[in-house]
Image (cartoon, rainbow, N blue to C red):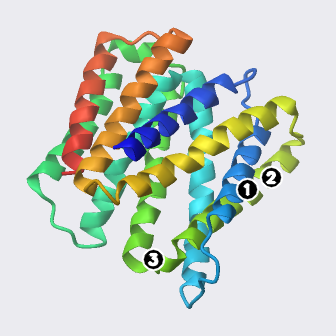
Amino acid sequence: MLNLTLAMLCSALVSVVMRLGAQGDEPRKPMLAVNYLTCFAVSLFFLRRGAAGAGLGFAAGLGLAGGVLYLGAFLLLQRNVRENGVALSSLFMKLGVIVPAILGVTVFRERLAPTRAAGIALTLAVVFVLFGGPDARGLRRGGVRSLVLLLLCSGMADGLSKVYSAWGDPALEGHFLCCVFGFALVLSAALCLRLAQRPGPRDVLYGLMLGLPNYFSSRFLLLALHDIPASIAYPVYACGTILLAAASGRLLFSEKITKRQCAALALALAALALLNV
């Protein structure tokens, strides 16, 4: 249970550090580049030496797609924590599990259990509860679209992990992660060059603070799965992260949570539990 608790803490810390590192109207991209440099360096440290095989090409190709989606999700998270707060951003990022759930039914021909169907329906209900009333006027223009895009991008990134677990070589999982973080690093560095943004001391500090929990949230979750069934670990991980992020947003940044958002949060926790049964 210790590894699962550490995974939840690290995952919630990602959103908190993202909010702390926000500066001005336009979030700094070099912070993300330093974050991925940190993730890539740590993934190299834990890489299994001597592993090779025909699956390297598949791991690299899927890693390239993962790098694009990971960077896209983090850019959207960076924008959303500044515009919509830590709680809502973490909520929609974790609701992305709806994407691999749908992928499992449509691509891998998994049986759509009644519980998962109910989870998908509740996920859609969360969106209507949040944005179907007057509280939605409190969001900035484009805030709804940004949150939905965050859900989709984060979900597609999770879906790639499902694809690799089904078709990839387990011995090359470390290489897959290296490719994901390596490609994300290259893309984020190219973005910094295009925007003519150089990393400053603040970017380096918050990039390191972001990269470590970003990597170890995944690593601790994998370690937790050795002892805890996935049907228990995933919903506890997602729900725990959302609750910790909501509490952090309230305590650290004085974010107000409306009654409508509380109702949406309760529906989201129920949806996550059903999607992972």
* Residue that carries the numbered disc 1 in the rendered image: 185
Name the residue: 35% across, 42% down: 237
The N terminus sits in image quarter: top left
Q: Position of residue 234 (x, y in %)?
A: 31, 49
Looking at the image, do the residues carrying marks 2 and 1 touch, with CB atoms under 8 Å apart? yes
Could you classify mark 2 by the number of other residues whose Cα lies within 10 Å: few (under 14), some (14-19), or many (20 or more)? many
- Of the image marks 3 and 1, the number of the one nearer the N terminus: 3
- Viewer can see residue 54: yes
Residue 186 in the image: above or below residue 13: below
- Work out whether 107 lies above or below 129: below
Identify the amino acid type marked 1: Leu
Q: CA distance from mark 3 to mark 1?
A: 24 Å
Distance from label 3 to label 2 (Cα)? 29 Å
Tell me where residue 241 sits by quadrant: top left
* SS state under label 3: helix
Residue 204 position in % (x across, y down): 80, 37
Q: Are marks 3 and 1 in contact (CB under 8 Å)?
A: no
55 over 240 or under it: above or below: below
Q: Position of residue 157 (x, y in %)?
A: 49, 56
Check disc 2 and report the residue beneath it: 189
* Residue most extreme to the left: 114
Q: Secondary structure at mark 2?
A: helix
| SS type, badge 1 | helix
Along the horizontal axis of the image, is 48 left or right of 135?
Answer: right
Mark 3 — residue? 170
Is residue 144 at least partly visible in the picture? Answer: no
Q: Residues within 10 Å of mark 1 (few under 14, many from 20)?
A: many
**Amino acid identity at mark 2:** Ala
Please give the name of the residue rendered at 46% of the width and 40% of the height, measured from the top-left corner.
6
Is 177 left or right of 163, judged from the image as shown?
right
